[in-house]
Image (cartoon, coloured by chain):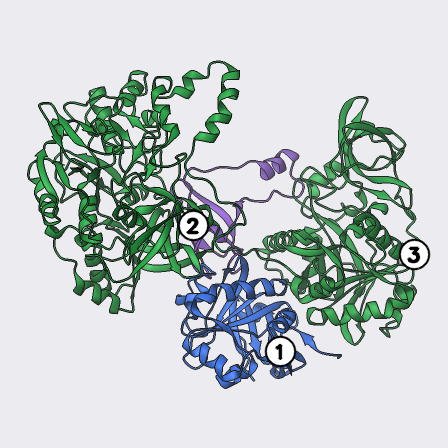
């Protein structure tokens, strides 16, 4: 595998003066100003981060009438027998191996219970987090974000683009992952920044995320 | 009393106006001595402040470039630039007021009667265009404002923050409901803020509401519509420093309308003079702005209704001249301002006429919701009844507390041409009488004929008086006359607010920045940005750049970004079965490692899309569709899957794959340096696919040939987009590789006579007439469109998609008309100048009888006809040898 | 028009999130006469009352559903995943 993988916001982060770092082969912003300041702004109001590097797996199949076994990773039900698994890159192999290992006693006249498609590259993934994150999002989408419980999801148009919204709070701080088809990444990022301006929403990088107890 | 501590100033028509914190633009101007605020629409009569509540048209001005702003409800801000509108050269001296002298030429509905000769309209129109209308539209691009939208969901929405609304909100919240309270004023309290006798503003209730997390209060917000499913349209002014207006889509399970009742004027001669005001306007002046509205006042009221405002006037130091009953008044006196009032018996001098008018329930939202407005004689008002489930009314809007200000229908209507009913359009009682006499005696037709209620106030000031006059003149009751239909938006909404944030989604390929750095001239393809062509040191015009790119592909090697292709990943045991069912071609027998082309038809045999489908494994296919049709194709496939129980799983992977087409006689030489995959035609023939690493990046290679040269379409993970693009260009440098854009691609494929669905086909095209008979495998037992296609296969074609070449130098445009023997015979779908042929070539639909090989056709070029010949073969390499090298 | 459709997966959503897919019809047998195919392709019952129809939740779960809607009041009585 060559070089470094770039998120759809790579050049936008460069233009914003972000300090980039390598993270599981991806080039991601470590910080824009400095980690503590970014974390504080998030805890005070709202923050936005580019998490497009997170592993995303699309699961479909008759075996998904019940939620799939993915350990500590998250499995989100997008529609009947259709799940999206999100996890940090190192966990990917184990999850795929687990989902693909069917019991030897399985009835071979039936198709495999789960089909996996790696959609890591298909989506741009952003995290909008903070006490005022819902107020930012309601300027962008008709989805009733307030009605989404922690670890629940919804799909709707956001900034005129079809989006998947996953709520995964950071401790008790409301946090929403926004997934849009990759080609819309820059467009939606700008729309979120614009809507968040009223609340002094600021981008935050990997260091701030780690500081807040997020991904590693 | 208004806060006098914070002082600032703004500009009005170049003059500096002093203002205080809490002032509206109108109150500051009034305090500074301004009395004329606008000129009326038709007669350019001087108009002054009437309602001070944003419900009449008399105070509309330009504020910071926005026209038709109601000065009486717009807070004044430091540095504002306010200008008058609808008067030239000034409000105090308007030359167009001379129009009044010609009022005999402009009776009601005059434009329906006066323009009896065709030329009269053409002569009058330019002049009417100049003088009609109010305000001037802002310059596009200059000083544009920021608007935004928001979406809210609530259990209960209360519209109106007066006494009843506040109580309703509190009761709901205490009952455990989540509540949104909407009020259009800067402070809560409704009319309690300025009508002292009605009671004090309930500060305790307000404090409680503000403390509850389940209650959200939105002030300075108008609810302009109540739509199906209890969707409320709310327009909030200045939600924060960065936005001028916010349009809120508020979905509520229950709606409580507590919008109160507003006051309307009486009808008498010159009732539109500056100095004639509603009593509530006077109360607002005194209690909200601390302004003495005049020196000496006459009150027009029905009995004891005068008492409250009489107290207020005395308290403000205004001399109270007398109190008159409404039917005693004949006329207001004065030319540009009130100087007195005339009754049947005498005349009184004054500079202020205060009308204690009838109060009308502000029930428009309830009418929109499906409620009925029925006449209540005792209340003197149309009150809302029969409300739908989940919509209720509270407070004065129900009409329960109202009392009659005057008899309705009136016993006597002074039909006079200066007795105004509709202030917005200068419609007088005489106009209404004339309209009724001309046969427009139903309130709905009278409205449309006279334009009563059709102006900026949307019927607030004039509907009741208009109904009264109509009832009186037709001898019907108020109930029989009825109201006109209330429709949203009321009040009006700016187009900027409807549009929202100036943000349009843009779709960028993973190589977008790389293109930007290399002289790309962009084009829009739907939401996608694609390189149209690339500028370089050696070419200047589009035509020369496109030709250079073309030559690179035909003679050496070129690289194009085709990441915009729609891509579907299809897995499952029955995947082949579904593809056989939905596409016209056969896919269940496609071997893994092979690629096949097909079209998709509907049950009427019409071509909907085409696709290139690769079989990657036993139960794994990869479909590419045209850029614009991906969504449709995915929905179509899913629809046919419903109810079958088949094991098929479709995933949209469009954004996940970057894709490029490397094409040209040297393409293999370039690709060889980047991959160990055997690229020889023996190991990797035309229409095959392989998975391999290219420059270390895992990729899917499809050997297909849209542009007609040896080439590979390479799909790889989008995060490597720029990396691989750069690597391929580096590897191709030694062969003088060129990136090429959409224009060059269009030309290259056109020379090969390759059809683009949706460009060369339309909603009437079937595969047989489009020359693609081979793509429909009628021997399949059943597939979508088979029935129609089998009939089309036997039928005589009506039209044919043919290739043509021009006889000489003319270059037609896409869409050009085709004539044969002087009759319309078809149209050109795609055409370009072909360097290979030295002439323009193209594709066209031509009626079947004229579509024979070698036939001559005439194509419309630049207004005249140019000759062309129909040719059956591709214009370049018809045998397809170049593809298979 | 702003009625709500109760998507069986997503709950109540505005009709604008959906793409209308036509009345629910029975597809003719492959060898049915042309007239039956024409009827199927082009003729609509256009019920004034409760109609069974297809909707695609394009700004939501992106699933095809069927709904029973009263075409005179726009009340959607039921929406479900068809079997």
Q: What is chain B's hue in the picture?
A: green
Question: Within 10 Å of the Cα at label 1, are there few (<14), some (14-19), or many (20+) other Cα atoms?
Answer: many
Residue at the limit of the structure toward the front, as seen here: B15
Real-space Cα separation, disc 2 to disc 3, in angstroms? 60 Å
Which chain is drawn using blue?
A
Q: Nearer the viewer, mark 1 or mark 2?
A: 2
Closer to the chain start, of discs 2 and 3, is: 2
State the residue position of label 1: A28
Question: Within 10 Å of the Cα at label 3, are there few (<14), some (14-19), or many (20+) other Cα atoms?
Answer: few
Q: What is chain C's hue in the picture?
A: purple
| Residue in the foreground of this view, choosing between B251 and B140 | B140
| Residue in the foreground of this view, choosing between B667 and B162 | B162
User: Is residue B449 in sight in this rendering?
Assistant: no
Q: Quadrant of residue B643?
A: bottom right
| Residue in the foreground of this view, choosing between B768 and B722 | B722
State the residue position of label 2: B64
State the residue position of label 3: B555
Q: Quadrant of residue B109?
A: top left
Real-space Cα separation, disc 1 to disc 2, in angstroms? 44 Å
Q: Residue at x 25, y 36 (%)?
A: B274
Q: Nearer the viewer, mark 2 or mark 3?
A: 2
Left or right: residue B231 versus residue B287 is: right
Element class at badge 1: strand
Q: Is residue B805 above or below residue B618?
A: above
Q: Chain of mark 2?
A: B
Q: Residue at x 6, y 39 (%)?
A: B304
Residue at the limit of the structure toward the top, as seen here: B117
Real-space Cα separation, disc 3 to disc 1, in angstroms? 41 Å
Q: Position of residue B124 (x, y in %)?
A: 48, 22
């Amino acid at each position: 595998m060559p070089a470094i993988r770039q998120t759809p916001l790579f050049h936008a982060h460069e233009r914003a003066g972000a300090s980039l770092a390598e993270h599981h082969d991806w080039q991601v912003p470590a910080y824009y100003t400095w980690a503590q300041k970014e974390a504080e702004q998030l805890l005070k109001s709202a923050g936005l981060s580019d998490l497009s590097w997170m592993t995303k797996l699309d699961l479909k199949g008759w075996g998904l009438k019940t939620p799939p076994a993915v350990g500590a990773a998250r499995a989100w039900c997008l529609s009947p027998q259709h799940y999206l698994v999100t996890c940090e890159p190192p966990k990917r192999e184990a999850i795929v191996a687990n989902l693909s290992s069917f019991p030897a006693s399985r009835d071979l006249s039936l198709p495999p219970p789960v089909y996996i498609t790696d959609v890591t590259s298909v989506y741009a993934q952003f995290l909008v987090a903070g006490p005022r994150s819902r107020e930012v999002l309601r300027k962008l989408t008709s989805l009733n974000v307030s009605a989404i419980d922690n670890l629940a999801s919804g799909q709707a148009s956001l900034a005129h683009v079809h989006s998947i919204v996953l709520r995964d709070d950071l401790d008790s701080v409301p946090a929403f992952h926004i997934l849009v088809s990759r080609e819309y990444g820059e467009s939606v990022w700008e729309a979120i920044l614009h809507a968040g301006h009223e609340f002094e929403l600021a981008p935050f990088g990997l260091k701030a995320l780690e500081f807040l107890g997020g991904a590693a | 009393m208004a806060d006098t501590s914070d002082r600032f100033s703004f500009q009005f028509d170049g003059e500096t106006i002093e203002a205080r914190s809490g002032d509206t633009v109108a109150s500051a101007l009034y305090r500074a001595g301004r009395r004329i605020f606008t000129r009326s629409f038709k007669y350019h009569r001087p108009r002054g402040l009437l309602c001070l509540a944003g419900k009449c048209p008399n105070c509309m001005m330009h504020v910071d470039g926005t026209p038709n702003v109601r000065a009486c409800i717009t807070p004044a801000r430091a540095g504002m630039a306010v200008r008058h509108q609808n008067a030239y050269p000034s409000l105090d001296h308007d030359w167009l007021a001379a129009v009044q002298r010609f009022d005999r030429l402009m009776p009601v509905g005059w434009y329906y009667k006066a323009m009896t000769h065709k030329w009269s309209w053409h002569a009058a129109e330019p002049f009417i265009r100049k003088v009609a209308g109010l305000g001037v539209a802002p310059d596009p691009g200059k000083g544009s404002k920021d608007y935004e939208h928001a979406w809210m969901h609530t259990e209960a929405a209360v519209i109106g923050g007066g006494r009843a609304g506040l109580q309703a909100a509190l009761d709901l919240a205490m009952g455990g409901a989540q509540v949104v309270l909407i009020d259009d004023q800067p402070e809560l309290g409704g009319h309690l803020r300025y009508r002292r006798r009605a009671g004090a503003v309930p500060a305790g209730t307000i404090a409680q509401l503000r403390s509850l997390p389940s209650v959200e209060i939105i002030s300075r917000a108008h609810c302009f519509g109540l739509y199906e499913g209890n969707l409320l349209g709310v327009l909030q002014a200045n939600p924060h420093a960065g936005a001028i207006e916010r349009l809120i889509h508020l979905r509520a399970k229950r709606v409580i309308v507590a919008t109160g009742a507003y006051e309307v004027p009486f009808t008498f001669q010159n009732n539109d003079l500056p100095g004639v005001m509603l009593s509530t306007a006077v109360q607002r002046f005194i209690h909200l702005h601390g302004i003495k509205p005049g020196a000496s006042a006459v009150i027009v009221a029905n009995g004891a209704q005068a008492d409250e405002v009489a107290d207020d006037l005395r308290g403000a130091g205004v001399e109270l001249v007398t109190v008159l009953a409404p039917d005693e008044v004949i006329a207001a006196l004065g030319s540009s301002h009130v100087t007195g009032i005339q009754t049947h018996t005498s005349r009184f001098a004054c500079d202020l006429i205060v009308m204690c008018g009838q109060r009308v329930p502000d029930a428009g939202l309830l009418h929109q919701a499906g409620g009925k407005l029925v006449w209540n004689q005792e209340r003197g008002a149309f009150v809302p009844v029969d409300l739908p489930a989940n919509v209720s009314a509270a407070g004065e809007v129900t009409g329960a507390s109202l009392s009659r200000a005057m008899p309705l229908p009136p016993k006597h209507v002074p039909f006079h041409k200066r007795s105004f009913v509709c202030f917005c359009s200068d419609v007088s009682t005489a106009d209404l009488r004339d309209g009724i006499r001309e046969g427009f005696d139903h309130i709905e037709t009278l409205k449309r004929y006279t334009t009563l209620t059709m102006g900026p106030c949307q019927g607030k000031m004039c509907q009741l008086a208009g109904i009264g006059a109509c009832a009186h003149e037709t001898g019907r009751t108020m109930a029989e006359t009825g109201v006109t239909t209330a429709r949203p938006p009321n009040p009006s909404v700016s187009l900027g607010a409807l549009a929202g944030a100036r943000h349009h989604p843009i779709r960028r390929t993973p190589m977008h920045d790389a293109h930007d750095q290399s002289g790309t001239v962009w084009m829009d393809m739907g939401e996608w940005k694609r390189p149209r062509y690339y500028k370089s040191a050696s070419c200047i015009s589009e035509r020369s750049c496109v030709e250079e790119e073309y030559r690179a592909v035909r003679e050496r090697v070129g690289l194009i970004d085709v990441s915009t292709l729609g891509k579907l990943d299809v897995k499952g045991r029955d995947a082949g079965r579904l593809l056989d069912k939905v596409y016209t071609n056969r896919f269940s027998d496609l071997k893994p490692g092979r690629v096949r082309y097909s079209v998709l038809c509907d049950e009427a045999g019409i071509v909907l899309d085409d696709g290139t489908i690769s079989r990657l494994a036993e139960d794994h296919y990869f479909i590419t569709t045209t850029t614009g049709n991906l969504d449709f194709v995915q929905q179509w496939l899913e629809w046919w899957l419903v109810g079958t129980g088949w094991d098929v799983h479709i995933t949209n992977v469009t954004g996940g794959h970057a894709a490029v087409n490397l094409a040209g006689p040297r393409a293999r030489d370039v690709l060889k340096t980047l991959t160990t995959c055997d690229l020889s035609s023996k190991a990797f023939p035309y229409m095959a696919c392989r998975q391999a690493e290219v420059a270390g990046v895992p990729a899917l290679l499809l050997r297909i040939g849209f542009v007609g040269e040896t080439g590979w379409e390479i799909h790889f993970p989008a995060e490597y987009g720029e990396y691989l693009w750069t690597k391929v260009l580096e590897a191709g440098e030694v062969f003088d590789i060129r990136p090429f854009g959409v224009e060059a691609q269009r030309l290259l494929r056109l020379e090969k006579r390759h059809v683009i669905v949706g460009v060369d086909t339309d909603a009437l095209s079937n595969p047989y007439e489009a020359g693609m008979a081979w793509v429909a495998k009628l021997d399949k037992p059943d597939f979508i469109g088979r029935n129609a296609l089998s009939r089309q296969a036997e039928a005589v074609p009506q039209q044919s998609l043919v290739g043509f070449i021009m006889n000489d130098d003319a270059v037609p445009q896409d869409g050009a008309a085709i004539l044969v023997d002087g009759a319309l015979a078809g149209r050109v779908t795609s055409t370009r100048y072909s360097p290979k042929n030295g002439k323009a070539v193209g594709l066209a639909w031509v009626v079947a009888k004229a579509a024979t090989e070698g036939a001559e056709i005439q194509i419309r070029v630049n207004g005249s006809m140019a000759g062309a010949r129909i040719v059956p073969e591709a214009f370049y390499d018809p045998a397809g040898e170049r593809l298979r090298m | 028009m702003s009625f709500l459709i109760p998507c069986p997966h997503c709950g109540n959503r505005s009709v604008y999130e959906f793409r209308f897919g036509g009345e629910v019809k029975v597809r003719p047998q492959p060898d049915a006469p042309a007239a039956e195919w024409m009827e199927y392709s082009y003729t609509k019952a256009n019920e004034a009352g409760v109609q069974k129809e297809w909707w695609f939740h394009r700004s939501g779960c992106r699933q095809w559903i069927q709904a029973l809607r009263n075409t005179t009041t726009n009340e959607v009585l039921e929406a479900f995943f068809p079997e």
